[in-house]
Amino acid sequence: MEGGGDQRGLEITEQGQVTQRRGKKEENGAVEAEESAAAAPAEVDQEMMSIEKDFEGKRIPPWREQLTFRAMAVSFFLSVMFSVIVMKLNLTTGFVPSLNISAGLLGFFFVKSWTKILEKCGLLRQPFTRQENTVIQTCVVAAYGIAGSGGFGNYLFGMSSRIGNQSTEASSSRDIKDPHLGWMIGFLFLVSFTGLFSLVPLRKIMIIDYKLTYPSGTATAHLINGFHTPQGATLAKKQVKGFAKFFVGSFVWGFFQWFYTAGDDCGFVQFPTLGLQAYKNRFYFNFSTTFVGVGMICPYLVNISVLLGGILSWGIMWPLIRNRRGSWFPSQLPDSSLRGLQGYMIFCTIAMILGDGLYNFFKVLSKTILAIRSHARSKSMASPLPVSDNDHSVNDTTVSFDDQRRTELFLKDQIPKKYACLGYIVVAIISIINIPHVFPQLKWYHILVTYIISPVLAFCNAYGTGLTDLSLAFAYGILAIFIFGAWVGSSHGGVLAGLAACGVMMNTVSTASDLMQDFKTGYLTLASPRSMFISQVIGTAMGCVISPCVFWLFYKSFKDLGIPGTEYPAPYALVFRNMAFVGVDGFGSLPKHCLTLCYVFFAGAIIINLLRDLAGKKWARYVPLPMAMAIPFYLGPYFAIDMCMGSLILFIWERLDKVKADAFASAVASGLICGDGIWTLPNSVLALAQVKPPICMKFLSRKTNDKLKKSKRSSPRSSRRLIILSSAGGTWQPPRALACRLG
């Protein structure tokens, strides 16, 4: 890693935070992280050889001084901002890019500005260090991570009547739990902290003894280390300026678009850029700066895979199945019925996600087992694995100055193992007692079983993440849906029990792997493990309050939240709910040939993954990603077109000036995403205040336009005012309303 500016990544939160990284030497940035994981330690050691020499003369603050008031204040502000952005992405596509770089960059900028002002006033008492920067980044990522793993776009929102009413399956009151701020905050506090304690006793094994790479944590550490060198600080200042320009531009563009959205299907987001027939099949560019920015961050292969999935589904499969109406499913059923076309969309998506998830689950599990066995064989029988907090021995073969320095400080501020174990037991007992009060369908023994097996699954996931940068928390959550849903049974509320158990499992497994990523970052920046752990706890607590409040703002502001075809369809809420129904009731209610198609897509996902693994590093970059292909199956490919536009912009930029593209692309993309995301806050306030946009801009076919002309001729009195229907009171608007014709 030669600098922070060339790091780009993908995080698909609804599918388990699948993260991929690319560097300068990877031309297209499309090779899986696991293919380079084996060589990564040696490369990182060579590139980082002199990092600690550069910082040798600087004082390292004790762990208490790393946890400053200004760090927590900046962390809170950034946590709110990023939680809004992640929530918006969760409720639109469920597709969330990695924002770690943005968090580190903005944390550096805000605190650096703070300290400069104090220094000019002669009030600066403590300089800004990379350890404090690491604490901020850890706290922010932990906070907005709750917006992803909290289930607001999948299992938690899937419990609501708004999602339940979209299903043709009979939903009794025991299978419905509508969102409410109180129980959501309480539930997240109950399930979000066990993962933090589960793997703390193994931190030395994972980071020092096994030397796991944790590519995302390593990339973040390179970024922070680079910021705090003279050259890195200069580059960071330029990156922040670029971020600010595109942030303002994106915010203003979102505000400008709002003026044209007075009615249903109005505005630039409904522009049929590829024609009306393509628009009906959801092929159009919707002018979203968010997804253009996401496309610039994600590897080219991811964007192409999403577009291929959209072409396969909405370009070929769904039109063909729609033509089978009356044969494969009753002709009178609407497309939104699960026994009709939507049933094929939902369950083919589920099949592909499960195929990809299970393949990678067993792949990572086998790699984990083989790696542990290999490491155990290489260890002397007289020198067992050091799990004791008092074992400060360091491998004698360590010759690097950086490794010696980092290991010494990593082992200095211990988190006593007995306190970690006691913390896990206490939090688990509190959860076992209280979760049944939130979800009566889950009994205390169900939760006890979850917490007995969670540490083992958390270890497997954290170890696999360290090897491959691939977290499969979603796979464990889906497994919990099927196991506990079937255990509780349909007559006792198995649907809600399965979704709630999914939340317990996902949060535990996800936070454990996130903590290990942060420990790796702290190890490489000489941040104290104790300050990192406390920062993670504080960030998690922030997220347990901020994320439900942000979701509640969306829920109250947008009455069509979770409805297909709207601005915020929350697609995976319905997907997860239907997984729970399948786990309880089986496949008997699926439309004709749907199960056969599910088998095909399930097997197809496995075969494509096998091809990727067998093709080798050179050709794997040309094999699409099944998980990315599955995303537009239900949503449509409109956001894929925006993302590919972002890839095209980046591609041209790299051809014109690769150095600047590598340095500033992430900052520009983050500005586009953050500006559009923050516009959501004033947009929500306007919606709550019932302030309506003044203009509705629609696009009409020639045939519809001719009908409007005839209507105007037959009604001369209204002809001067009749242009288009606006949402303001359901009345025909004067000439300020705008209509656009397509020939």
Image (cartoon, grey):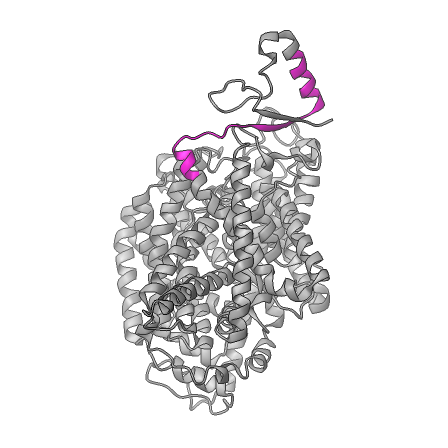
Q: In percent of the image, x 35 and y 82: which residue is there? A: 412
Region of the chain picked out in magenta, as a range: 684-711
How far across and how far down the image is residue 406, in percent?
44, 82
Q: Could you tell me how many numbered marks the image carries? A: 0
- The x, y position of residue 401, in whole percent, is 49, 88
Between 329 and 739, the one lying in front of the other is: 739
Where is residue 538 shown, x and y percent of the image? Answer: 33, 62
Q: Is residue 575 above or below residue 51?
A: above
Q: Residue furthest front?
A: 121
User: Magenta stretch: residue 691 in it?
Assistant: yes
Who's the residue at 48% across and 34% down the image? 166
The answer to whether residue 580 of the structure is visible from this angle is yes
Q: Residue 298: name its quadrant.
A: bottom right
Residue 442 horizontal/vertical position (percent): 33, 49
In the rendered view, does 331 fall on the left or right side of 79?
A: right
Residue drawn at (28%, 67%), measured in percent from left and top? Answer: 423
Q: Is residue 359 left or right of residue 534?
A: right
The answer to whether 461 appears left or right of 619 in the picture is: left
Residue 74 higher or lower than 271, as above or below: below
Residue 197 seen in the figure: no
As for residue 335 lying within the magenta part, the answer is: no
**Quadrant in the picture for the C terminus:** top right
Observer-nearest of 466 and 350: 466
Quadrant occupied by the N terminus: bottom right
